[in-house]
Image (spheres, rainbow, N blue to C red):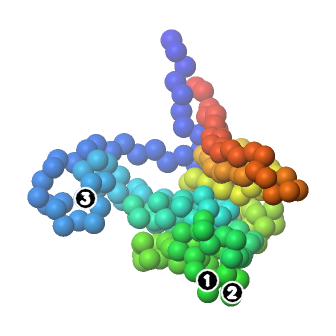
């Protein structure tokens, strides 16, 4: 007899079935999602608690794409502020944000609120390695790491493995030499696989 795999603690599995295509969904903002995942799936999204660590180019896209389908709870972490050199990459960033050194997490909060005014948002303009900040990741359903520092990767790696939280790292990087010539460009997607118990 084959062992039965069970979900690790903290993973909340819900089974949803497609909803029938009826006119009842015609005026619903989330019409296509509800047709795909049913209302129980949409409700699951609205209750989901997502952490996004790092709010540069990839992080700003992530919060936009997560807020629009109505993810309900966000924990945002980044210690940096908007600079002029960021404006070509940050969704929603303005010249005023660069001049005022708007914290990137405040920009992310603004993006989420524009897309989903009912979202609950907690943000930390701080390093994820700070113990009180890292501690806040423990209650999340999923963690997206979009920071580019090794310290952030190590902290998130430790938290998601210790507390069995599914996570993924997403990022891209362009490196230049001392003369300003591009010497390397790459993207990374690393899924953290958290193994469950086998019974």
Q: Secondary structure at mark 2?
A: helix
| Res 137 visible | no
- Residue 194 or 64: which is nearer the viewer? 64
The mark found on residue 95 in the picture is 1
Q: Is residue 193 above or below residue 96?
A: above
| Res 78 visible | yes
Q: Quadrant of the C terminus?
A: top right
Residue 149 in percent (x, y) is at 79, 56
Residue 71 in percent (x, y) is at 45, 62
Q: Secondary structure at mark 3?
A: helix
* Residue found at x 71% / y 52%: 173
Foreground: disc 1 or disc 3: 1
Which residue does the numbered mark 2 point to in the structure image? 99
Q: Are marks 2 and 1 in contact (CB under 8 Å)?
A: yes
Which corner quadrant of the image does residue 140 belong to?
A: bottom right
**Residue found at the very far right of the displayed protein:** 178
Q: Is residue 151 left or right of residue 121?
A: right
Which corner quadrant of the image does residue 123 belong to?
A: bottom right
Which residue does the numbered mark 3 point to in the structure image? 31
Distance from Cα at disc 1 to Cα at disc 3: 36 Å
């Amino acid at each position: 007899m084959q062992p039965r795999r069970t979900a690790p603690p903290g993973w909340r599995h819900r089974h949803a079935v497609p909803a029938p295509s009826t006119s009842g969904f015609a005026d619903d903002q989330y019409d296509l999602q509800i047709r795909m995942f049913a209302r129980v799936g949409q409700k699951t999204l609205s209750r989901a608690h997502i952490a996004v660590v790092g709010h540069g180019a990839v992080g700003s896209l992530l919060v936009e794409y997560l807020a629009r389908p109505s993810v309900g709870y966000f924990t945002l972490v980044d210690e940096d502020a908007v600079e002029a050199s960021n404006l070509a990459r940050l969704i929603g960033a303005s010249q005023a944000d660069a001049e005022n050194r708007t914290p990137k997490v405040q920009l992310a909060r603004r993006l989420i609120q524009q897309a989903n005014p009912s979202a609950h948002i907690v943000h930390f303009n701080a390093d994820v390695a700070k113990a009180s900040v890292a501690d806040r990741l423990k209650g999340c359903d999923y963690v997206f790491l979009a920071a580019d520092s090794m310290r952030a990767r190590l902290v998130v790696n430790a938290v998601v493995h210790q507390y069995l939280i599914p996570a993924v790292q997403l990022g891209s990087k362009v490196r230049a030499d001392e003369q300003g010539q591009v010497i390397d460009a790459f993207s990374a997607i690393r899924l953290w696989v958290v193994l469950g118990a086998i019974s």
